[in-house]
Amino acid sequence: MEIDNEPDLDPKPLHNNDEGLGRVDERRFTKELDRLIKESEEMRLNRMKQHRTRSFVAMNFSILFILIGISAFGWFFLMEAQLLMPVVYLVLSLIPSALLNIWAGGPLKAYTRDHKEIFMPKLANALNGLSYHPNRGVSAKTIEKLAVIPAHDRYEAEDCFMGTYKGVKVIFSEARLYSKSRKDTPVFDGIFVLLETPDDVFEGHTVITANDKMVKAYANTRWKTMNEVHVSVSEPDWDIFTIYSTKPESAELLIGERLLKELAEAAAIFDKSPLTAVLFGKRHVFMMIPYDKDMFEASNLFVPVTTQAQALQCKKEVEQLLEIIDVFDLYQPMET
């Protein structure tokens, strides 16, 4: 399995690691973020002015066409004693009004498109030199291999970030899984993360989860070929995970306190989400993080852009993922 890694859209990333992603310099990031927010605010104001101008034009011409339609209706109905033609003219007068309203709403769609095509790629580049793809994510073929994905009929991914850090390929995106049995709400709403190490590191299929409901549902069904693994930690806040593996001896050697600490801290960043991680395919780490906040959508056209807190939170999340990758520096590649 390969993760596509397209070149960044901005030629000058703000990281300092020649191998790919790196730690963002805080001062440079803040300066770049302020510039991006100012640029985004100017974009919003331009679209808002365009929308108001079009709305004014559309309203006045709609009134004019409707008055013409009403006049035609009255003339043919009262003066000509016809019924069909008045109705036809009245309906025809409504068509330009509908088209004008669609035209007036164009800047709203353009603003949303600009946010995805202009602002988000630049923000992604500022966040450790990532590339941004609005409609991509971890492939459906990959998640089908995992023993933690709930039954679903439809998988949707959006707001995807990609990059490479210390030779480890990184991809994460918002993800939603839907089932016909639950039409109103998704069976999963959150974030999928996939890491791919350059060398074989893992043996078997290992699940590390803070989701007690998942453990109760799968321990004696999907995970019946796995054995529970016990890893002791020194801090109660890190002791939130249940571990199952098809190679328990290897998992006991591989999974240490530091990895569980980083996973626990990642869960805490996402509002103490019941994070689940899967080590599989010798060199892959998959994480699913329930998190129902839609983080990367455009703000309201009529509300000033205030994305700094969102961007700083995203930066914190990205760097926590990099902390997890740092843990793998402790592991030696598997002997072949």
Image: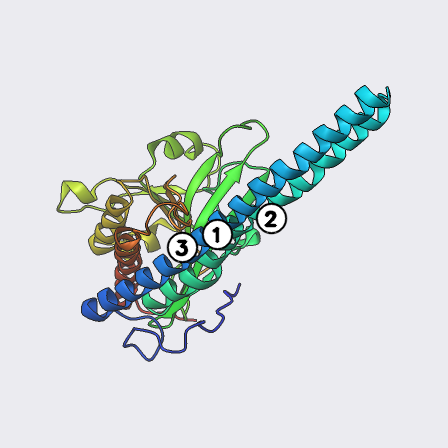
* Residue indicated by mark 1: 112
Mark 2 → mark 1, Cα distance in angstroms: 15 Å
Q: Secondary structure at mark 3?
A: helix
Q: Earlier in the sequence, mark 2 or mark 3?
A: 3
Left or right of 9 on screen, residue 30: left
Q: Nearer the viewer, residue 332 or 284?
A: 284
Q: Secondary structure at mark 2?
A: helix
Residue 50 seen anywhere in this rendered image of the structure: yes
Mark 2 → mark 3, Cα distance in angstroms: 18 Å
Q: Residues within 10 Å of mark 3 (few under 14, many from 20)?
A: many
Asked if the residue at tag 1 contacts the one at tag 2, i.e. Cβ–Cβ closer than 8 Å, the answer is no
Position of 291 relative to 32 (above/below): above
Residue at 44% across / 34% down in the picture?
Answer: 218
The label nearer to you, 2 versus 1, is 2
Residue at 29% across / 66% down in the picture?
Answer: 35
Q: Which mark is residue 103?
A: 2
Q: Which mark is residue 44?
A: 3
Left or right of 61 on screen, residue 10: left
Q: At label 1, which amino acid type do we have?
A: Thr
Residue 285 seen anywhere in this rendered image of the structure: no
Left or right of 231 on screen, residue 104: right
Q: Which mark is residue 302?
A: none
Q: At label 3, which amino acid type do we have?
A: Arg
Position of 120 relative to 298 (above/below): below
